[in-house]
Amino acid sequence: MDNCIFCKISQKEIPSHTVYEDDVVYAFLDISQVTPGHTLVIPKKHVMDIFDFDDALAADVFSRIPKIAQAIEDAFPEIEGLNIVNNNKALAYQSVFHSHIHLIPRYSNEDDFSMHFGDHTADYTTEKLADIADKIRKQVR
């Protein structure tokens, strides 16, 4: 896309701090650095979000994640964890509409990053869960 900032970054039209690059993906430091080493992994091919991936692109992009994550851990052996985050569409906090995966090193509970998963266990019976699973299963292509 002509106005996509991540396309411009991967094509070296806009400077970035490269972490890893090959023919399929470009990984670079997120300018916000939620924690030191916060890296974005993008496909070089412009796709808006996970819903635009085909099987081959997904396999190519996601197969690079462990290699880049291991490099982050090796560079920062003091990290105690790593969040892998992929936001899709505006409601899910996607702010740049070129698919990207955040690799966020975790150093402590006070490192200015958090996630919250509400517990709605009491709202779902076995029957409701079975119905939801059935709806999804029928759509798998």
Image (cartoon, grey):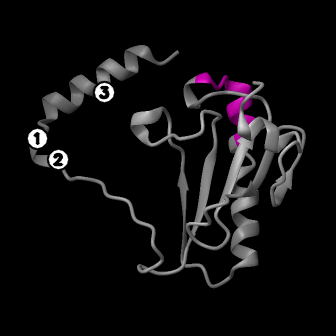
Magenta stretch bounds: 52-61
Mark drawn on residue 120: 2
In front of the other: label 2 or label 3? 2
Q: Quadrant of the N terminus?
A: top right
The residue under the point 61% across, 23% down is: 52
Image coords of residue 9 (percent x, y): 80, 44
Residue 68 appears left or right of 91? right
Mark drawn on residue 133: 3
Image coords of residue 29 (percent x, y): 72, 60
Mark drawn on residue 123: 1
Secondary structure under the numbered disc 1 in the rendered image: helix
Q: Residue furthest bottom?
A: 78
The residue under the point 42% across, 15% down is: 139
Is residue 31 on the magenta stretch? Answer: no
The residue under the point 62% across, 66% down is: 33
Image coords of residue 41 (percent x, y): 70, 49
Q: Are marks 2 and 3 in contact (CB under 8 Å)?
A: no
Secondary structure under the numbered disc 2 in the rendered image: loop
Q: How far apart are the alpha carbons under marks 2 and 1? A: 5 Å
Image coords of residue 103 (percent x, y): 62, 58
